[in-house]
Image (spheres, grey):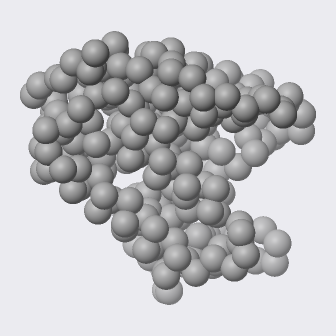
Protein backbone atom coordinates (compact mmCIF):
# COMPACT_ATOMS: atom_id res chain seq x y z
CA UNK A 1 0.00 0.00 0.00
CA UNK A 2 1.46 3.39 -0.91
CA UNK A 3 2.18 5.77 1.96
CA UNK A 4 0.99 9.25 1.07
CA UNK A 5 2.51 12.30 2.76
CA UNK A 6 0.40 13.88 5.48
CA UNK A 7 -1.86 16.54 3.95
CA UNK A 8 -2.99 19.83 5.50
CA UNK A 9 -6.33 19.55 7.31
CA UNK A 10 -8.82 22.09 5.99
CA UNK A 11 -12.09 22.91 7.76
CA UNK A 12 -14.54 25.49 6.41
CA UNK A 13 -16.08 27.71 9.08
CA UNK A 14 -18.52 29.84 7.07
CA UNK A 15 -18.97 31.44 3.68
CA UNK A 16 -20.01 34.99 2.80
CA UNK A 17 -23.17 34.16 0.84
CA UNK A 18 -26.38 35.23 2.60
CA UNK A 19 -29.56 33.18 2.38
CA UNK A 20 -33.17 34.33 2.13
CA UNK A 21 -34.74 31.33 3.82
CA UNK A 22 -34.05 29.20 6.84
CA UNK A 23 -32.23 26.04 5.61
CA UNK A 24 -34.80 23.61 7.01
CA UNK A 25 -34.05 20.74 4.63
CA UNK A 26 -30.31 20.96 5.21
CA UNK A 27 -30.89 20.81 8.97
CA UNK A 28 -33.28 17.86 8.58
CA UNK A 29 -30.72 15.99 6.46
CA UNK A 30 -28.05 16.63 9.10
CA UNK A 31 -30.42 15.48 11.85
CA UNK A 32 -31.28 12.26 9.98
CA UNK A 33 -27.62 11.45 9.47
CA UNK A 34 -26.82 12.07 13.13
CA UNK A 35 -29.82 10.07 14.39
CA UNK A 36 -29.09 7.14 12.10
CA UNK A 37 -25.47 7.06 13.22
CA UNK A 38 -26.05 7.46 16.95
CA UNK A 39 -29.25 5.51 17.50
CA UNK A 40 -29.42 3.00 14.65
CA UNK A 41 -25.79 2.23 13.89
CA UNK A 42 -25.00 2.61 17.61
CA UNK A 43 -21.25 3.27 17.40
CA UNK A 44 -18.96 1.70 19.97
CA UNK A 45 -16.02 3.95 20.74
CA UNK A 46 -14.81 6.72 18.47
CA UNK A 47 -14.80 4.87 15.16
CA UNK A 48 -16.44 1.49 15.71
CA UNK A 49 -19.78 0.69 14.07
CA UNK A 50 -21.91 -2.42 13.64
CA UNK A 51 -20.32 -4.28 10.71
CA UNK A 52 -23.42 -6.42 10.19
CA UNK A 53 -25.59 -3.35 9.55
CA UNK A 54 -22.92 -1.80 7.32
CA UNK A 55 -22.84 -4.93 5.17
CA UNK A 56 -26.62 -5.32 5.05
CA UNK A 57 -27.57 -1.69 4.47
CA UNK A 58 -24.43 -0.32 2.84
CA UNK A 59 -24.30 -0.23 -0.96
CA UNK A 60 -22.03 -3.02 -2.23
CA UNK A 61 -21.11 -2.70 -5.95
CA UNK A 62 -21.12 -6.49 -6.38
CA UNK A 63 -24.73 -6.72 -5.21
CA UNK A 64 -25.79 -3.86 -7.47
CA UNK A 65 -24.21 -5.46 -10.56
CA UNK A 66 -25.25 -9.04 -9.70
CA UNK A 67 -29.03 -8.94 -9.09
CA UNK A 68 -30.22 -11.60 -6.67
CA UNK A 69 -26.80 -12.11 -5.07
CA UNK A 70 -25.96 -10.79 -1.61
CA UNK A 71 -22.92 -10.49 0.61
CA UNK A 72 -22.58 -11.39 4.26
CA UNK A 73 -19.80 -11.48 6.82
CA UNK A 74 -17.88 -14.75 6.83
CA UNK A 75 -15.10 -14.62 9.38
CA UNK A 76 -12.93 -11.59 8.65
CA UNK A 77 -14.14 -11.13 5.05
CA UNK A 78 -17.30 -11.01 2.97
CA UNK A 79 -18.85 -13.94 1.19
CA UNK A 80 -21.17 -13.19 -1.72
CA UNK A 81 -23.68 -15.51 -3.35
CA UNK A 82 -27.33 -16.22 -4.07
CA UNK A 83 -28.94 -15.50 -0.72
CA UNK A 84 -32.12 -13.52 -0.27
CA UNK A 85 -33.38 -14.23 3.25
CA UNK A 86 -32.54 -11.71 5.91
CA UNK A 87 -30.99 -9.24 3.50
CA UNK A 88 -32.16 -5.69 2.82
CA UNK A 89 -33.36 -5.30 -0.80
CA UNK A 90 -30.37 -4.20 -2.85
CA UNK A 91 -32.12 -1.15 -4.41
CA UNK A 92 -32.93 0.07 -0.90
CA UNK A 93 -29.23 0.17 -0.01
CA UNK A 94 -28.72 2.95 -2.56
CA UNK A 95 -30.77 5.12 -0.18
CA UNK A 96 -29.79 3.72 3.21
CA UNK A 97 -26.07 3.90 2.46
CA UNK A 98 -26.29 7.70 2.07
CA UNK A 99 -27.24 8.11 5.73
CA UNK A 100 -24.70 5.73 7.31
CA UNK A 101 -21.17 6.57 8.41
CA UNK A 102 -18.05 4.77 9.53
CA UNK A 103 -17.18 6.91 12.52
CA UNK A 104 -17.54 10.28 14.23
CA UNK A 105 -14.92 11.97 12.03
CA UNK A 106 -16.59 10.64 8.88
CA UNK A 107 -19.96 11.94 10.05
CA UNK A 108 -18.63 15.25 11.37
CA UNK A 109 -16.71 16.13 8.21
CA UNK A 110 -19.65 15.41 5.95
CA UNK A 111 -22.12 17.33 8.08
CA UNK A 112 -19.79 20.33 8.35
CA UNK A 113 -19.48 20.62 4.57
CA UNK A 114 -23.21 20.00 4.14
CA UNK A 115 -24.06 22.84 6.52
CA UNK A 116 -21.59 25.37 5.10
CA UNK A 117 -22.45 24.82 1.43
CA UNK A 118 -25.84 23.08 1.49
CA UNK A 119 -27.80 26.01 2.92
CA UNK A 120 -26.98 28.16 -0.12
CA UNK A 121 -27.75 25.40 -2.60
CA UNK A 122 -31.07 24.78 -0.85
CA UNK A 123 -31.80 28.51 -0.98
CA UNK A 124 -31.24 28.51 -4.74
CA UNK A 125 -33.84 25.87 -5.55
CA UNK A 126 -36.30 25.43 -2.69
CA UNK A 127 -37.03 22.46 -0.45
CA UNK A 128 -38.51 19.91 -2.86
CA UNK A 129 -35.97 20.38 -5.64
CA UNK A 130 -33.16 20.34 -3.10
CA UNK A 131 -34.24 16.97 -1.70
CA UNK A 132 -34.38 15.53 -5.22
CA UNK A 133 -31.01 17.08 -6.12
CA UNK A 134 -29.41 15.70 -2.96
CA UNK A 135 -30.74 12.15 -3.31
CA UNK A 136 -30.13 11.87 -7.05
CA UNK A 137 -26.66 13.32 -6.52
CA UNK A 138 -25.95 10.62 -3.95
CA UNK A 139 -27.16 7.92 -6.33
CA UNK A 140 -25.03 9.37 -9.15
CA UNK A 141 -22.03 9.38 -6.84
CA UNK A 142 -22.57 5.72 -6.03
CA UNK A 143 -22.84 5.08 -9.76
CA UNK A 144 -19.36 6.53 -10.18
CA UNK A 145 -17.95 4.14 -7.58
CA UNK A 146 -19.75 1.15 -9.10
CA UNK A 147 -18.52 2.05 -12.59
CA UNK A 148 -14.93 2.11 -11.29
CA UNK A 149 -15.13 -1.34 -9.68
CA UNK A 150 -18.42 -3.13 -10.41
CA UNK A 151 -17.31 -6.34 -8.66
CA UNK A 152 -16.10 -4.71 -5.44
CA UNK A 153 -17.31 -6.55 -2.35
CA UNK A 154 -16.84 -3.60 -0.01
CA UNK A 155 -19.78 -1.58 1.37
CA UNK A 156 -19.96 2.06 0.36
CA UNK A 157 -21.50 4.24 3.05
CA UNK A 158 -21.68 7.92 3.88
CA UNK A 159 -23.17 11.20 2.73
CA UNK A 160 -19.93 12.13 0.96
CA UNK A 161 -21.29 11.51 -2.54
CA UNK A 162 -24.44 13.57 -2.03
CA UNK A 163 -22.39 16.31 -0.33
CA UNK A 164 -20.00 16.26 -3.30
CA UNK A 165 -22.99 16.96 -5.55
CA UNK A 166 -23.81 19.94 -3.33
CA UNK A 167 -20.22 21.17 -3.67
CA UNK A 168 -20.33 20.86 -7.45
CA UNK A 169 -23.54 22.86 -7.58
CA UNK A 170 -22.23 25.48 -5.16
CA UNK A 171 -19.06 26.19 -7.14
CA UNK A 172 -21.13 27.12 -10.21
CA UNK A 173 -23.76 29.03 -8.27
CA UNK A 174 -21.27 31.13 -6.32
CA UNK A 175 -17.90 31.27 -8.12
CA UNK A 176 -17.07 34.57 -6.36
CA UNK A 177 -17.84 33.32 -2.86
CA UNK A 178 -15.19 33.25 -0.17
CA UNK A 179 -14.92 30.76 2.68
CA UNK A 180 -13.46 31.43 6.11
CA UNK A 181 -11.26 28.38 6.63
CA UNK A 182 -9.35 26.78 9.50
CA UNK A 183 -6.10 25.19 8.30
CA UNK A 184 -3.79 22.80 10.15
CA UNK A 185 -0.34 22.19 8.64
CA UNK A 186 1.59 19.95 11.04
CA UNK A 187 1.92 22.29 14.08
CA UNK A 188 0.90 25.45 12.23
CA UNK A 189 -2.70 26.60 12.64
CA UNK A 190 -4.30 29.57 10.95
CA UNK A 191 -7.66 30.95 9.84
CA UNK A 192 -7.83 32.57 6.41
CA UNK A 193 -10.47 33.48 3.85
CA UNK A 194 -10.17 31.45 0.66
CA UNK A 195 -12.10 31.86 -2.61
CA UNK A 196 -14.60 29.00 -2.75
CA UNK A 197 -13.63 28.19 -6.32
CA UNK A 198 -10.04 27.57 -5.18
CA UNK A 199 -10.96 25.61 -2.06
CA UNK A 200 -13.47 23.34 -3.79
CA UNK A 201 -11.39 23.12 -6.96
CA UNK A 202 -8.40 21.88 -4.97
CA UNK A 203 -10.68 19.45 -3.13
CA UNK A 204 -11.84 18.00 -6.45
CA UNK A 205 -8.28 17.77 -7.80
CA UNK A 206 -7.30 15.86 -4.67
CA UNK A 207 -10.13 13.37 -5.26
CA UNK A 208 -9.06 12.98 -8.89
CA UNK A 209 -5.41 12.44 -7.89
CA UNK A 210 -6.17 9.66 -5.43
CA UNK A 211 -8.75 8.11 -7.77
CA UNK A 212 -6.07 7.99 -10.49
CA UNK A 213 -3.70 6.41 -7.96
CA UNK A 214 -6.27 3.68 -7.42
CA UNK A 215 -6.35 3.02 -11.16
CA UNK A 216 -2.60 2.47 -11.19
CA UNK A 217 -2.67 0.41 -7.99
CA UNK A 218 -6.20 -1.00 -7.59
CA UNK A 219 -5.15 -3.36 -4.79
CA UNK A 220 -3.32 -0.67 -2.88
CA UNK A 221 -6.51 0.58 -1.30
CA UNK A 222 -7.78 4.10 -0.97
CA UNK A 223 -7.82 4.14 2.79
CA UNK A 224 -11.49 3.17 2.73
CA UNK A 225 -12.42 6.36 0.89
CA UNK A 226 -14.70 6.15 -2.16
CA UNK A 227 -12.90 8.71 -4.30
CA UNK A 228 -14.83 7.76 -7.44
CA UNK A 229 -18.09 8.41 -5.60
CA UNK A 230 -16.84 11.90 -4.72
CA UNK A 231 -15.97 12.53 -8.36
CA UNK A 232 -19.31 11.17 -9.57
CA UNK A 233 -21.26 13.34 -7.15
CA UNK A 234 -19.27 16.48 -7.93
CA UNK A 235 -19.65 16.03 -11.69
CA UNK A 236 -23.39 15.49 -11.23
CA UNK A 237 -23.61 18.72 -9.26
CA UNK A 238 -21.79 20.62 -11.99
CA UNK A 239 -23.96 19.15 -14.72
CA UNK A 240 -27.36 19.35 -13.01
CA UNK A 241 -27.32 22.52 -10.93
CA UNK A 242 -28.74 24.72 -13.70
CA UNK A 243 -31.68 22.33 -14.04
CA UNK A 244 -32.58 22.81 -10.37
CA UNK A 245 -31.41 26.26 -9.28
CA UNK A 246 -33.49 29.31 -10.13
CA UNK A 247 -31.46 32.20 -8.73
CA UNK A 248 -28.11 33.22 -7.37
CA UNK A 249 -26.97 35.46 -4.56
CA UNK A 250 -23.95 37.71 -4.77
CA UNK A 251 -21.38 37.54 -1.94
CA UNK A 252 -21.65 40.15 0.77
CA UNK A 253 -19.20 43.04 0.36
Examine the rendering and report whether any part of residue 63 can be seen.
Answer: no
**Residue at the image point whose x is 62% and y is 62% from the top:** 104
* Front-lying residue, 47 or 15: 15
In the rendered view of the protein, which quadrant contains the N terminus? top right
Residue 152, horizontal then vertical, whole percent: 64, 50
Q: Residue at x 13, y 38 (%)?
A: 20
Q: Is 235 located above or below residue 115 in the figure?
A: above
Residue displayed at 81% across by 78% down: 75
**Residue 29 seen in this snapshot:** yes
Give percent across and percent down for residue 101.
56, 62
Q: In this rendering, would 8 be left or right of 143?
A: right
Q: Quadrant of the C terminus?
A: top left
Residue 83 figure quarter: bottom right
When asked about the image quadrant of residue 197, the answer is top left
Q: What residue do we see at 21% from left, 18% from top?
A: 250
Q: Position of residue 251 (x, y in %)?
A: 27, 20
Where is residue 193 shown, x and y percent of the image?
A: 50, 21
Classify 135 as above or below 28: above
Task: Please tell me which residue lies in front, 139 or 171.
Answer: 171
On screen, residue 73 versus residue 117, left or right, reads right
- Using the image as rendered, state which of residue 12 and residue 159 is in the foreground: 12
Amino acid sequence: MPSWPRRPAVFPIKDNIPTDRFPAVTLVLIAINVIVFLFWQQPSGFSGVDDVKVVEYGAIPFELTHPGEHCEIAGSSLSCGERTTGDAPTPLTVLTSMFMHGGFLHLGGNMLFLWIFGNNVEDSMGAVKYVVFYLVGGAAALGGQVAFDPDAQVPTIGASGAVAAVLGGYILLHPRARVLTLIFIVFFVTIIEIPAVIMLGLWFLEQAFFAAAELSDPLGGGGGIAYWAHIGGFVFGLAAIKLFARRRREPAL
